[in-house]
Amino acid sequence: MREVLLHLSSGDPVLARLIDRIGPYAMDYLEPDFETLVRSITFQQLSGKVARVIFQRLVAAAANGRLTPESVLQLRPRKMRAVGLSQQKVAYIRDLARRARSGEVDFAALPAFEDEAVCQALTAVKGIGVWTAQMFLIFALRRPDVLPSADLGIRAAIRKLYGLAELPTPSQVEELARPWRPFATVASWYLWRSLEGQAGL
């Protein structure tokens, strides 16, 4: 990791100051499994506090307190709505469960896929967009060079740290991030930390 931080610091003085201020890199990872992706769907467009409560209720409602394709499909949609999920998210999670049960989404195979192939496999599921797939790449598959350029937190951090008048566009983020390659994930973690004191979902 020392070499990675040296690469980022030498290529970007703003990032160098941020790394120096925040200190060692310490990403919190999740398992690359069905439950993690359900968690990501649950957290979409919600505050972390609210989403955590809903997700914990969903886990508690599932058979044996575990989220698997089978345990989700055993739950009635009405029960899933009762834990606080929107109708849309119930549909998304059930679609994912059906695809995972059929093997169309094969979590055991995903670690061997290239980043782009992972994104293609996951975004085929209803309700999973590029951002959710990127979060899975970062926090579950531990990929080192993922840049969620449309992420609001990343864009807000760049605006603040680089003294921009407005939020940068995703293409501007991509351009600014060129010196970070091939370690954009690490740079992204530091940007999240600069805003919230913690990285992740």
Image (spheres, rainbow, N blue to C red):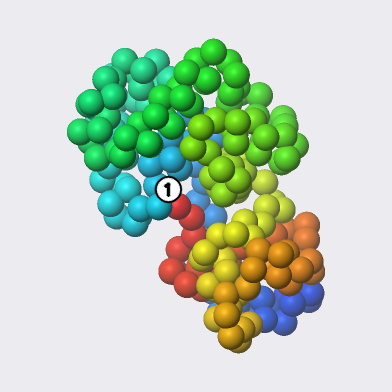
Neighbourhood count class around disc 1 (C-alpha, 10 Å): few under 14, some 14–19, many 20 upward: some
Vertical side of 188 occupied by 116: above or below: above
Q: Which residue is situated farthest in the front direction here?
A: 88
Residue that appears at 30% across and 31% down: 59
In the shown orientation, is residue 106 left or right of residue 176? Answer: left
Q: Tell me if 76 is positioned left or right of 7 in this view.
A: left
Q: Is residue 15 above or below residue 178?
A: below
Tell me residue 16's x, y (percent): 68, 78
* Residue 160, percent from left and from top: 55, 81
Q: Is residue 52 visible?
A: yes
Residue 100: x and y, percent?
52, 20
Q: Which residue is mark 1?
A: 44
Quadrant assignment for the N terminus: bottom right
Residue at point 57%, 49% (across, down)? 131
Residue at 37% in and 26% down: 67
Percent x, y for residue 118?
67, 35
In this view, the residue in front, 183 or 48, is 48
Left-right relation of 192 to 173: left
Which residue is at the front of the view, 200 or 174?
174
Residue 189 visible, this orientation: no
Secondary structure category for the residue under label 1:
loop
Residue 26 vertical position relative to residue 31 in the rendered view, above or below = below
